[in-house]
Image (tube, helix red, strand yellow):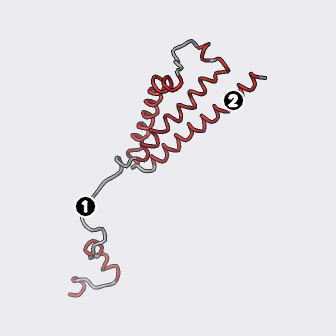
Amino acid sequence: MEALKTSADVLFILLGAILVLAMHAGFAFLELGTVRSKNQVNALVKILVDFSSSTIAYFFVGYGIAYGVSFLTGADTLTQKSGYDLVKFFFLLTFAAAAPAIVSAASPSARASIRSSRRPFSSSRWSTRSSRASRGTRTTASRRG
C-alpha cells in the first residue's frame, strides 16, 4: 500500500510539473506576440537558451544548496521511492526556469523605440493634394482650366 501511495504522489507531482512546463509555451507565445515577425526566431532561441541555462544552473548549484542532494550518485540511489527525487527535481526546475522566462517576456528593451520626429497628426501630413482632390475640393490646377 505504501508503494501505491508513493507512486500516486510521484504521478501527481509529475503532472503538476508538466503543467508548469506548459506555462513556458505560454510565456513564449506572449513574447512572440510582442516582437516583429523577423525577430521571432531570435526570441525563441533566447527562450530556449534561458531555459537551458536555468536548467544547468539549477542542476549544479540550486538544488544542491536547497536540499543537499547531489545528482552525481548512482541511478539506483536516484530511483528509490519510485523516482520521487527525480520528479521533485523536475517540478522545482520548471519553477526555477519560469522566473527568467517571465522576466525576459516582460522586459521592453528589445521592443522599445523612442522617436521624436514630428507630430503624428499635423495638418501638413494629412492634407495632401491627392486627398483634397478625392474630397472634391478644387486644386490649383483645376481652377485654371
Report the side of 59 relative to 17 (left or right).
left
Q: Position of residue 114 (x, y in %)?
A: 29, 56
Give the labeled residue for mark 2: 9
Give whichever of discs 2 and 1 has the lower sequence position: 2
In the image, 60 versus 36, the foreground residue is 60
Q: Is 138 above or below relative to 8? A: below
Q: Is 13 above or below relative to 121? A: above
Dot 2, how many residues are within 10 Å of its Cα: few (below 14), some (14-19), or many (20+)?
A: some
Q: Residue furthest right?
A: 1
In the image, 43 versus 140, the foreground residue is 43
Tell me the residue at 54%/13% (across/down).
73
Q: Secondary structure at mark 2?
A: helix
Which amino acid type is shown beneath numbered disc 2? Asp
Tell me the residue at 55%/31% (across/down).
92
Which amino acid type is shown beneath numbered disc 1? Ser
Tell me the residue at 71%/25% (across/down).
6
Q: Position of residue 18 (x, y in %)?
A: 60, 35
Give the labeled residue for mark 1: 116
Dot 1, how many residues are within 10 Å of its Cα: few (below 14), some (14-19), or many (20+)?
A: few
Q: Position of residue 124 (x, y in %)?
A: 25, 74
